[in-house]
Image: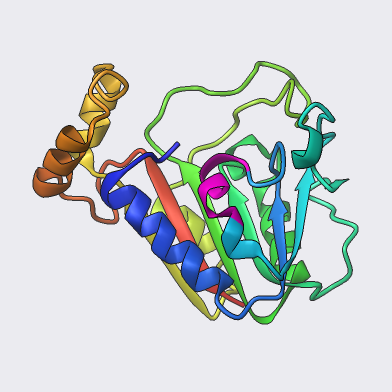
């Protein structure tokens, strides 16, 4: 989860760009409505048709239950059904990510935007099961910025940016980030860290237009 600092600002800017002018928004692969980084921005979706689609989603979230089940590798939505697709920390759990990329592009309208995040230099974070359900999901893949660019090469515009840099990666592997997740430490990291494509990062963010 992004909690503060430059990575969160980068995500927020990308989310604002993706939602600008969008009327039909798909949040695919989520565990619940407005999960993860989206919860603080729930109000930004007011007046839009927001569809939260999970894989065999749980019904324990009350009003935040997903709207439907979808297999991201074979979605049942019609072609060009959405003008924005959000996919947060999902692609690494998908057995065939190239199929998921094709499906995401298929349901996007021409001119529609995609916002996707996925971990890079992080430890295993699956649940050890063979299903992609949220109770038993595996953890298959890590993607470089070039790998993400290749998967979504059909986008007319595509940017992949690191969320954090090499120093943050070292802090994470030493177990320091949870202990020192404060505004001061985050500001210090933002000042001295040097995120750039091709360098160590915990996560990548992709934003593109169909």
Decide: is 210 above or below 48: below
Residue farthest left in this picture: 192
Q: Is residue 78 left or right of residue 72?
A: right
- Asked whether 102 or 29 is in front, the reply is 29
Q: Which residue is drawn at the image coordinates 71% and 69% (left, top)?
A: 48
Q: Quadrant of the N terminus?
A: top left
Q: How is the image coloured?
A: rainbow
**Which stretch did the figure color magenta?**
35-42
Q: Which residue is drawn at the image coordinates 40% and 65% (left, top)?
A: 13
Inspect the magenta stretch and tell me whether residue 158 lies in it. no
Decide: is 135 above or below 117: above
Q: Is residue 66 left or right of residue 110?
A: right
Inspect the magenta stretch and tell me whether residue 37 lies in it. yes
Is residue 40 visible in the rendered image? The answer is yes
* Magenta-drawn stretch, dominant element (helix, strand or loop): helix
User: Residue 61 in the image: x percent, y percent?
Assistant: 76, 31
User: Residue 80 in the image: x percent, y percent?
Assistant: 79, 76
- Asked whether 163 or 5 is in front, the reply is 5
- Asked whether 80 or 130 is in front, the reply is 80
Q: Is residue 120 left or right of residue 179?
A: right
User: Residue 6 in the image: x percent, y percent?
Assistant: 27, 51
């Amino acid at each position: 989860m992004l909690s503060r600092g430059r990575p969160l600002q980068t995500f927020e800017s990308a989310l604002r760009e993706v939602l600008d002018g969008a009327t039909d928004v798909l949040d695919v692969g989520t565990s619940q409505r407005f999960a993860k980084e989206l919860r603080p921005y729930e109000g930004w979706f007011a007046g839009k048709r927001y569809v939260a689609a999970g894989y065999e989603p749980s019904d324990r979230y009350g009003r935040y239950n997903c709207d439907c089940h979808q297999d991201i590798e074979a979605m049942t939505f019609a072609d060009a059904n959405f003008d924005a697709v959000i996919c947060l920390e999902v692609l690494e759990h998908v057995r065939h990510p190239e199929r998921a990329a094709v499906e995401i592009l298929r349901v996007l309208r021409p001119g529609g935007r995609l916002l996707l995040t996925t971990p890079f230099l992080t430890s295993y974070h699956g649940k050890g099961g063979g299903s992609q359900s949220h109770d038993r999901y595996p953890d298959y893949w890590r993607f470089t910025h070039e790998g993400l660019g290749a998967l979504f090469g059909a986008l007319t515009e595509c940017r992949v940016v690191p969320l954090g840099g090499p120093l943050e990666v070292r802090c994470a592997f030493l177990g320091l980030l949870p202990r020192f997740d404060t505004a001061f430490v985050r500001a210090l990291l933002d000042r001295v860290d040097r995120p750039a494509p091709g360098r160590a990062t915990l996560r990548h963010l992709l934003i593109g237009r169909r």
